[in-house]
Amino acid sequence: MKKNKIKNTGLEVTEISFGSSSLGSMPDTYGYEVSEDRAQKTLKRFFKGPVNMLDTSRNYALGESEKRIGKAIKDIGKWPDQFILSTKLDRDSDTLSLDKYQARKSFEESLEALGVDHVDILFLHDPEYVKDITEVTKKGGSMDELFKIKEEGLAKAVGLAMGKISLMFPLLKKWDFDALISHNRYTLLNREADEMFDYAYDKKIAIFNAAPYAGGMLAKGSSNFKKITYQDITEQTLGPVKAIEKVCKKHNVDLGAAALQFSLRDKRISSTICGVTSIDSIEKNLAWAKAKISDEFWDEVLKLPFSTDDPEANRIWTPG
C-alpha cells in the first residue's frame, strides 16, 4: 500500500489508517455494540497489515478503546516495528478541564493502558469541548505541553485532532504541527475542511481525513443505517445520500468504495482514517480501496451538491 511521509519525523503512513473509537464499543454514538472478543479478533487482523496505522484516544469509550488495544499489544509481545500508533491528549470527562496537568495525566494514562513507553503520533484532542480554551492556548498550557512531550522523545510527531473548523483553522496557524485529524468535514456529503486542507498541504502538515463514511452512513447505506455524522437521520439529511446512491447504482459502484476513494484520490490527504470493528470491516475497506471506478462516475457524482456547513453543529456529544 502506498505510504506518505509525515513531515520530517521519519514516519511513513499508509494511505489508509484505522480508527478505533467504535472498537471500544460506543453504542450511543454509533448505534451498535462491539464485544471484547470481536475487538480482539479485529486487532489481530490489523497487525497482519497492509494498513500500518491505528488511531485511538484516551476518551474513546471511556478508556475502553486503549484498554483493548493494550491487551492486543500484550498478546503479541510488543507494538510491531513499522506500524504507527497514534493517541490523543484528552480533557477530564467530569470537569472538562484540559490544562497542562490534565494533558500530562491523559498521556500517562494512555501509556499505561496501551502498555507502551512512547507513541508515534500524539494529538491534542477536541479543544472545542473544554471548559476554558485558554487552558489550551495560553503560554504553559496544554498545547505547549503537547510539544514538550515531543521534545522529551515520547512522541515522534504531534498534531491537532478536532471537529470545529472555525476554531481548528486559527489554531493550526499558531503552532508548528506535524499532522492534523479532521473528521466528517471532507466527504462526498460535506467539504467544510477544503480551505483548511489547502493551507495544511501548503505548510506540509500531514492531513488525516477521518470518517469518510460520515459516521457509517456512506458505508452501510440509507436502507441499513439510521445515523449521519452520529445524529439520527431526517428526510432532509437523507436526501443527498440517496442522490449519491442513485449515481452509484447507475454506474454499478459500491457506495463505500465511492466514499473511500473520494478521499484517497485527493493528493493533499496523507491518510484516510476508517473506523473498523470487525475483520469483515477491514477486508471491506481494503476491497473498496482497490475497486475500479470509472471517470464517468466521478464526473457525475462530483457534480452533485454538497454542504460546507458544520455537519455536527446540532450534535449532542456523548462519551459512549
Image: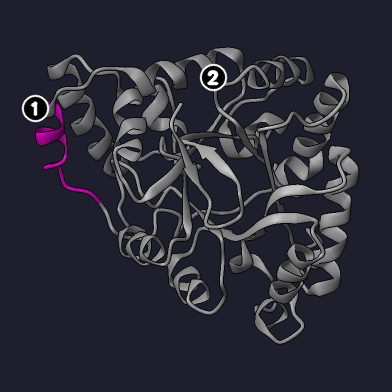
Residue at far bottom of view: 139
In this rendered view, identify the residue nearer to me: 15 or 263.
15
> Residue 62 vs residue 235: left or right?
right
Q: Which residue is mark 1?
A: 296
Q: Is residue 99 above or below residue 248?
A: below
Q: Is residue 268 above or below residue 145?
A: above
Q: Mark on residue 45? A: none
Look at the image and say whether residue 299 sits in the magenta stretch: yes
Say which amino acid is labelled 2.
Ile
Count numbered badges in the picture.
2
User: Crowdedness of circle 1 by 10 Å Cα count: few (<14), some, many (20+)?
Assistant: few
Q: CA distance from mark 2 to mark 1?
A: 28 Å
In this rendered view, identify the residue nearer to me: 67 or 52.
52
User: Crowdedness of circle 2 by 10 Å Cα count: few (<14), some, many (20+)?
Assistant: many
Dot 1 falls on a residue whose secondary structure is helix
Q: Which residue is mark 2?
A: 282
Q: Residue at the spot x=76%, y=67% of the render?
A: 151
Q: Is residue 158 above or below residue 282?
A: below
Quarter location, residue 240:
top left
Look at the image and say whether residue 45 sits in the magenta stretch: no
> Residue 143 vs residue 242: left or right?
right
In the rendered structure, which segment of residues is drawn in magenta? Answer: 297-306
Quarter location, residue 194:
bottom left
Q: Can residue 231 be seen at all in this image of the molecule?
A: no
Q: Is residue 48 above or below residue 264?
A: above
